[in-house]
Every structure is written in structure tokens, then in C-alpha cells.
Image (cartoon, rainbow, N blue to C red):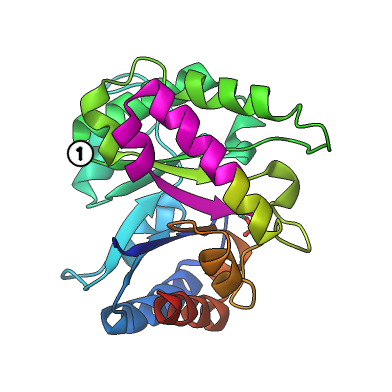
Amino acid sequence: MSKILVVGNWKMNPATISEAKILAKKIKAVAPRLQNTDAVMAPPLAFASACAPQKPVKNLYLGAQFVSVESGVGPFTGEVSVDMLKSLNIQYIILGHSEQRARGETSAMVSKKMKNALEAGITPVLCVGEMNRDQDGSYLEPLKAQIKESLEGIPKKYAKEIVIAYEPVWAIGAKEAMMPDQIYETSLFVKKVFADIFTPDAGVKATILYGGSVNFRNAADIISIGKVDGFLVGRESVNAAGFVELLKTVDSVV
Ligand code: PGA
């Protein structure tokens, strides 16, 4: 069995570089003690260098939350290319997050960014998820379409490099996570769509994370009943004590 992957999406937190360094230091301290878990910290880009380990830390990787749709260099004010992320030793990039989609990122842009990231050797964490959920399953078709559009034009050879974070939008920043049995059910659906796009084998082997109100209290159940390969964590990833506890909990469940 492969390792559990826990990606901490710090979003636009914390407020200062000194707070960011303190948070990163605590994560760097716990990561080497993990047995079955890899942790990714994705601080705001402005803090990436300050948070990056000076030398490699076992089980710990650096992530980014944003990349430009443009590649190379050029007159693109405010943009950051995938090669620039690579040169900062960033190994993961969160793409298609609902908060970015709400700010104008389309699935077509996501697929272009996915391709750029994969070509640069950065692992994309593709976020997908329905806005609302009803009893009759009508959210499944739009979810499928979102996955297909976000992966449009990605060569099959890259299938095993892609991480999918299933994040029902209604469970992000909410009080409660989705129920673990529903997470299991929907992650199977996501795998099936992935298999249809790439190959049956790629579907079976796909890395599916769950995101949406994960914390150290609900993490164990979501791993064991929801059977996901890890988490994309928002709020709990900037709460040092909670995130450390979450990593330890996940590590002991496997
Ligand atoms: P949350 O955010 O853990 O605060 O719900 C998750 C996310 O948006 O990735």
C-alpha cells in the first residue's frame, strides 16, 4: 500500500512571514517521524522560500496554490510560471480549487496548467467537487464533466502523476466534513471517471484525496471508512497543533 498524502492548503494565511516560519518549523519537526505518511505544505507563494526546508526533510514536500496559465517568461504582470515554482523546489501544485474557480479559473485553464505542471515534473493536485448535493444524484454528471474538462488533452502517460482532490464545495469551510461512507462512494465514482479518461488500471491506481472540513478528530474515520489516499486540508493546516495531531493520527491508522 502506498503512503497517505496530506496536503496543507494554507490559503491566504498566516498574516506575516514570521508566523509562517513558526508554522513551517513545527511541520518540519514532525514530518521525519512519520512512517506511512507524506506531508505537503502549500504556503502563500510570498512565503514559500522562507518556509522551504534548507535541506530535504523526510516525508515533507513544498506545494503552491497558484500558477499562471502562461509558461516561460514574458510580459504577464502578476503571474508566476511553473518553471519559477520548480526553481523554488515546489513539488506539488493545487489546481482547480473552488476558490480559484470562483475567481475565474475555468476547467480549460486548469487543464492547460495541469499540462504545464506535468511537463515540468510538478505533481498537480486537481480539485474537483460538486457545488450542492441532492438525493437523486443529479450532481454526478456535472462532476464527471468537470473532471473530464479539467483533464482534457492530458496524455495518458501522465495519469499516474496526477493527484485528485475530491472536495464537495458545500463541505469546504463548513462545520462538518462529508460522511465517510459518502466519501467512499463518490471517490469510487471519481476513480471510474478517471479510468474512462485514461485506462482501467489508472483508475484503480488513482490517488484520491478528500478535502472539506478535515480535522484531527474526523481524519481517522475518513481514512478507514472513506478509504481515500489522503487529504487536502484548509483550516486545520494552519493550526500547528491540530495539523501535527492530524498527521500523527493518519499515520497511525494505516
Ligand atoms: P477546509 O478547506 O479544510 O478549511 O474546509 C479545505 C480546502 O479548501 O482545501
| Any part of residue 221 in sight | yes
Q: In this view, does 22 lie to the left or right of 36?
A: right
Q: Which of 20 and 161 is in front in this view?
A: 161
Asked which secondary structure carries label 1, the reply is loop
Residue lying at 52% horizontally and 66% vertically, measured from the top left? 223
Q: Give the range drawn in magenta.
A: 186-212
Q: Is residue 29 located in the magenta-colored stretch of the structure?
A: no
Is residue 81 visible in this depiction of the protein? Answer: no
**Residue 149 relative to residue 177: left or right:** left
- Is 189 inside the magenta-drawn segment? yes
Q: What residue type is labelled 1?
A: Gly
Residue farthest along the right direction in this orientation: 135
Image quadrant where residue 33 sits: bottom left
Q: In which quarter of the image is residue 72?
A: top left
Q: Where is residue 148 in the image (x, y as percent from the top left)?
A: 49, 21
Q: Name the residue under label 1.
A: 121
Q: Main secondary structure of the magenta part?
A: helix
Ligand 1 quarter of the rendering: bottom right
Residue in the image at 31% along x and 25% along y: 115
Look at 24% across and 50% down and name the residue there.
Answer: 88
